[in-house]
Image (cartoon, rainbow, N blue to C red):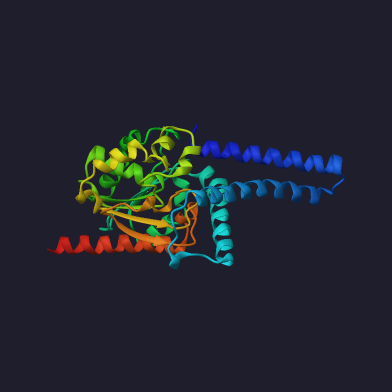
């Protein structure tokens, strides 16, 4: 089952639960129709909120120390939770159920095209907020829907290679920049290990657990197993081999954007990869990294700097 159909199925389950609660409140509780409907919808939303809050609690248990400059007060913590909850609801309940991978090419653009690679349990719908920014700058771009959902990360390399070749052919460019969220950053690294870096101008990762995350231990699938981290053993054997196979030139292609308050990647400093460029944020959750204005502005700055550098090389 694809993520698109999985999220549609989950929406139907939630709708059925709401209908059941509403009917019970009317039938047995004597609630008026409007109140019963409001209470039923509120119950489903409350469960989703509790799941979101539980992720923050789990991440806090395994968290790395938060630098003083990034510590949050009560109001900022509420904003963090609200933004992450809204981002999660919009992504899983509206964007992903409707998403289809695609490509948009600007034939007159000489800017480096961008391939967007989503994370674990997501699809191309995750990038709904970044796509308009790329369009505004007339940057050719493409998205992929990695399948199967719980597949081996190395097995995704062929899908990425196919998307890269198609995007290069369509745009007339020799290289691409890759923006990968969470597992998507590891997919990009696994692809470079398998296929080399000749097609790579830049790789920007958002909230990628480069050294693993403890919360991957709660997820199913081969890919979740590959992303695991534990206090006893650190990064998984797969992640350790991935790191050992990279040279300084490969690491220099990477920019890692991460949040000290990531509620899925814990410890949060797992996103720090020696040899890469790093930009740390505070007060941003894991899913919200793909829609937060500060984070997206940094992505666009990095792409802009890349295009300036490429233009200079062309002139020389």
Pinpoint residue 153: horizontal percent, then vertical percent. 36, 36
Q: How far from the left and from the top, in percent, is residue 121?
A: 48, 40
**Can you give x and y, in whole percent of width and height, for residue 174 in the image?**
21, 49
Residue 190 visible from this viewpoint? yes
Q: Name the one closer to the observer, 271 or 99.
A: 271
Q: Residue at x 59, y 62 (%)?
A: 78
Which residue is most to the front?
A: 232
Which residue sits at x=51%, y=49%? 61
Q: Is residue 110 left or right of residue 97?
A: left
Residue 226, by quadrant, is top left
Q: Is residue 42 left or right of residue 281?
A: right
User: Which residue ends up furthest to the right in the rendered image?
Assistant: 30
Q: Residue furthest left?
A: 316
- Asked if residue 312 is positioned above or below residue 37 in the image, the reply reads below
- Rendered location of residue 112, percent (x, y): 27, 55
> Residue 123, can we see it?
no
Instruction: State left or right for residue 220 relative to residue 106.
Output: right
- The answer to whether 76 is drawn above or below residue 3 in the figure is below
Count numbered badges in the picture. Answer: 0
Q: What residue is drawn where x is 39% and y is 61%?
A: 280
Quadrant occupied by the C terminus: bottom left
Q: Is residue 4 above or below residue 271?
A: above
């Amino acid at each position: 089952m694809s993520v698109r159909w999985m999220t549609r199925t989950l929406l139907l389950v939630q709708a059925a639960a709401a209908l059941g609660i509403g009917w019970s409140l009317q039938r047995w509780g004597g609630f008026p129709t409007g109140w019963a409907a409001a209470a039923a919808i509120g119950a489903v939303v409350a469960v989703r909120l509790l799941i979101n809050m539980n992720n923050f609690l789990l991440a806090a248990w395994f968290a790395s120390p938060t630098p003083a400059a990034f510590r949050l007060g009560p109001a900022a913590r509420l904003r963090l939770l609200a933004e992450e909850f809204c981002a999660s609801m919009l992504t899983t309940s509206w964007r992903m159920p409707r998403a289809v991978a695609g490509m948009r090419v600007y034939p007159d653009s000489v800017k480096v095209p961008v391939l967007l690679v989503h994370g674990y349990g997501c699809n191309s719908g995750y990038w709904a907020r970044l796509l308009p920014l790329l369009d505004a700058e007339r940057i050719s771009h493409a998205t992929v829907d990695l399948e199967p959902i719980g597949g081996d990360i190395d097995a995704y390399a062929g899908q990425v290679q196919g998307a890269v070749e198609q995007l290069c052919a369509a745009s007339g460019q020799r290289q691409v920049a890759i923006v990968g969220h969470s597992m998507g950053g590891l997919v990009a690294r696994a692809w470079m290990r398998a296929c080399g870096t000749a097609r790579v101008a830049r790789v920007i990762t958002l909230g990628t657990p480069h050294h693993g995350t403890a919360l991957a231990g709660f997820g199913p699938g081969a890919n979740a197993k590959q992303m695991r981290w534990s206090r006893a053993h650190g990064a998984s054997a797969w992640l350790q081999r991935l790191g050992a196979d990279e040279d300084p030139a490969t690491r220099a292609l990477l920019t890692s954007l991460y949040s000290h308050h990531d509620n899925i990647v814990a410890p949060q400093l797992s996103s720090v990869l020696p040899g890469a460029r790093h930009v740390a944020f505070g007060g941003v959750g894991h899913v919200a990294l793909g829609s937060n204005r500060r984070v997206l502005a940094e992505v666009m700055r990095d792409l802009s700097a890349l295009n300036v550098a490429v233009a200079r090389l062309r002139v020389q």
